[in-house]
Amino acid sequence: MKAKHFIPIIVSVIFTVCTGQRDAIIIRPDPFQELIFNQTDSREAWKIIESQNGLLESGIPEWVILYLNEGAAGIESLDQYSDRYVFIGENRGTNLNALKQWAMGFNAVLDFPRLLAGRVENRLISSASLYPDDEYGEYFERLIKLVSDSEFQGMEKTQTFWVKRMKDPDITEEDDTETEIEIETERYEYFIFVSIDRELLQTQLKQLMTGITTNRPPTRNQSAAINRIQNTFFEGF
């Protein structure tokens, strides 16, 4: 089975942030999950009706607009971020105060590794022709866990911003599930901008990637896949 049919474990986990609240940190999924996300919760079905600065589209920072339309890659395409990797911590829900508390408590040292682990996982999956566990053996799981548990130097949490969205009644979305769920018509989306120097992150990731040992030696094909991803990892990352 091709990797595009594999739904990763790490990035699909929802991290609750406040007891009793439905808000959760959103970690951008891989392209296949993003397709599912868009089919069931298309951003085009939500209109921005309020923002942090009280203005609508014209008052929203460029990085927020780019992230909503193109993801972090859109922000990295700007000249001012050409030498940095950009990660966005995203949280959404109906309780703005809870989201503000989450943003205030966001710790770049502790929370950045989870954002990075999702991006690392996506990179490995995108270059695999099999399930990641088959493609890379134990190396895949160990690398993701190692990234999640490590501390990285140099990341900067520089900006935050929130918008409020309302479901557009003119855009209907098909739902073929039979389970009754609570339909949300308005929500806040809160974004935290984190960036890190490209060369610095590459150095730290290379050290992690080359220092992994596994209990079960990789097969010949797995060793080839591991060597290949180590040599080309930052192409398209």
Image (cartoon, rainbow, N blue to C red):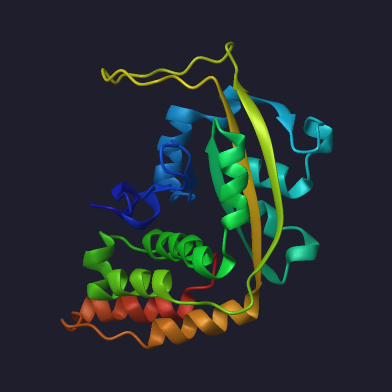
* 152 or 41, nearer to the observer: 152
Residue at figure coordinates x 37%, y 49% from the top left: 12
Residue at figure coordinates x 57%, y 29% from the top left: 187
Relative horizontal placement of residue 28, taking residue 145 as reference (left or right): right
* 19 or 204, nearer to the observer: 19
* 93 or 39, nearer to the observer: 93
Q: From this view, report whether residue 90 is shown above or below residue 202.
A: above
The furthest residue to the left: 216
Q: From this view, report whether residue 205 is shown above or below residue 85.
A: below
- Residue 8: image location, x then y, percent: 33, 54
- Residue 39: image location, x then y, percent: 44, 29
Residue at figure coordinates x 66%, y 30% from the top left: 164
Relative horizontal placement of residue 56, taking residue 127 as reference (left or right): right
- Residue 119: image location, x then y, percent: 48, 61
Q: Quadrant of residue 219?
A: bottom left
Q: How many marks?
A: 0
Q: Quadrant of residue 186?
A: top right
The furthest residue to the top: 170
Relative horizontal placement of residue 104, taking residue 27 as reference (left or right): right
Q: From this view, report whether residue 31 is shown above or below residue 42.
A: below
Residue at figure coordinates x 46%, y 18% from the top left: 173
Which part of the image, by quadrant, shows the C terminus?
A: bottom right
- Residue 117: image location, x then y, percent: 44, 65
